[in-house]
């Protein structure tokens, strides 16, 4: 991990908290495409390029297998943050950790070596100068069970006590081995909160752990709920999709529509031709946010190319900043024994894709 002076960066962070108002209004003010341009071809969304110095963030010092992972990043960009810095939250097996950066490239751990609190797969949503962190919390191991909780903050440093907002209640969210709701993503559309989430699990025998089987959605007039669930999953495993033939993984949307459609990113769980479990990032499109189709002919970020993402490319967060899109994601270099690190992919408006 690239490091700067912890003392200097911490002082700057605390000083700047008092100088910035934080994120803007509830319904997103920015969205596709970047820089106010109009993308006119679907191919644009399929041209992500890895940052050359990947991975950017590695497991914390002293963490070795099976704790050698840092996963599921979520971002607050400088234009939304209370201090004009980049903020990233990700989880290890210890809990959720906080990182800060002046440029989104060189990251430093905030608040010591320990986690903020117990949880995994976080997502930060901004509204009216307040930050809300949604995350999954494991409640039991046999069977595997989890719920979604939410906390709030005005400075990204101190967080409220948790409130449970979603738990597995529907038949498809349960199986003999798994009863989970997790991988939260929250957006606001026309005054209504849309909570996308993963549920249930598919067991990967070559890894000896579960990955999400279905994706569902729930809506509410209030951020703390209660949330009304769609009765059936919106995405599930299917043999018709070679990159999602085992499980649905997770989903995150861009904040505004493009050409009348929503754009989303999805890390499908699949078995490859050799019989090994995999995950890769797909780009999806939808007219209503419920029924989804593939936008690109295959994954935009796939495993197997380089050692640090040899086995899996997992969850992510996508933000627009400085005229480009940034996708921070984590990847795994092995199956049963593996280290997970966080990297970056970039999408810049191509001249021939804009008018």
Image: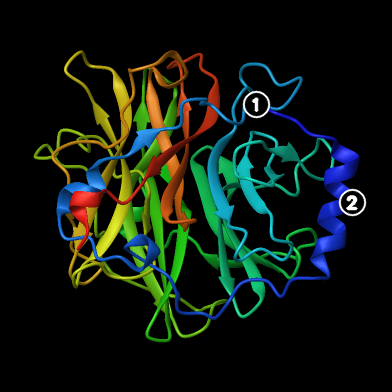
- Secondary structure at numbered mark 2: helix
- Lateral position of residue 283 relative to residue 64, left or right: left
Q: If you read the primary sequence from the N terminus, does the residue marked by circle 1 or circle 2 appear first?
A: 2
Please give the count of numbered marks on the rendered protein.
Answer: 2
- Identify residue for label 1: 59
Locate the C terminus by quadrant: bottom left
Q: Residue 146: which disc?
A: none
Residue 249 point in image, percent of width and height: 35, 43
Q: In this view, does 336 lie above or below 135?
A: above
Q: In which quarter of the image is residue 64?
A: top right
Residue 310 point in image, percent of width and height: 39, 17
Q: Residue 11: which disc?
A: 2
Badge 1, how many Cα within 10 Å: few under 14, some, many 20+? some
Q: Which of 146 and 244 is in front in this view?
A: 244
Q: In this view, does 54 lie above or below 174?
A: above
Name the residue rendered at 51%, 17% in the picture: 338
Q: Which of 230 and 179 is in front in this view?
A: 230
Name the residue rendered at 52%, 83% in the picture: 222
- The Cα–Cα distance between marks 1 and 2, rounded to whole angstroms, is 24 Å
Q: Which of 115 and 212 is in front in this view?
A: 115
Badge 2, how many Cα within 10 Å: few under 14, some, many 20+? few
Name the residue rendered at 61%, 43% in the picture: 90
Q: Is residue 326 visible?
A: yes
Residue 133 point in image, percent of width and height: 61, 61
Q: Is residue 295 visible?
A: no
- Lateral position of residue 276 relative to residue 239, left or right: right
Q: In this view, does 152 lie above or below 299?
A: below
């Amino acid at each position: 991990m690239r490091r700067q002076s912890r003392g200097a960066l911490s002082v700057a962070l605390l000083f700047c908290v008092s100088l910035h108002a934080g994120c803007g209004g509830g319904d997103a003010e920015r969205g596709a495409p970047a820089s106010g341009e109009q993308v006119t071809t679907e191919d644009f969304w399929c041209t992500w390029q890895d940052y050359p110095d990947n991975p950017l963030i590695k497991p914390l010092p002293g963490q070795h297998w099976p704790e050698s992972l840092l996963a599921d990043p979520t971002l607050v960009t400088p234009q939304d943050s209370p201090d004009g810095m980049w903020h990233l939250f990700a989880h290890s097996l210890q809990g959720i950790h906080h990182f800060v950066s002046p440029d989104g490239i060189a990251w430093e751990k905030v608040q010591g070596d320990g986690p903020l609190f117990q949880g995994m797969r976080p997502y930060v949503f901004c509204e009216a100068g307040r930050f809300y962190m949604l995350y999954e919390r494991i409640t039991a191991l046999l069977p595997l069970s989890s719920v979604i909780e939410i906390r709030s903050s005005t400075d990204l440093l101190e967080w409220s006590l948790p409130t449970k907002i979603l738990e597995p209640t529907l038949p498809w969210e349960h199986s003999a081995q798994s009863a989970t709701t997790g991988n939260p993503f929250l957006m606001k559309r026309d005054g209504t909160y849309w909570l996308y989430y993963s549920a249930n699990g598919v067991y990967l025998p070559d890894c000896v752990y579960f990955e999400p089987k279905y994706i569902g959605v729930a809506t509410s007039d209030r951020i703390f709920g209660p949330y009304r669930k769609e009765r059936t999953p919106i995405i599930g495993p299917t043999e018709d999709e070679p990159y999602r033939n085992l499980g649905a993984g997770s989903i995150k949307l861009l904040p505004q529509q493009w050409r009348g459609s929503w754009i989303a990113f999805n890390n499908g769980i699949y078995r490859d031709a050799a019989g090994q479990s995999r995950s890769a990032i797909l780009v999806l499109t939808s007219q209503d946010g419920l029924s989804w189709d593939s936008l690109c002919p295959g994954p935009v970020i796939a495993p197997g190319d380089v050692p640090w993402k040899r086995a899996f490319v997992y969850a992510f967060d996508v933000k627009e900043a400085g005229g480009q899109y940034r996708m921070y994601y984590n990847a795994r270099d092995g199956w049963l024994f593996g280290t997970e690190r966080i990297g970056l992919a970039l999408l810049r408006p191509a001249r021939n894709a804009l008018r």
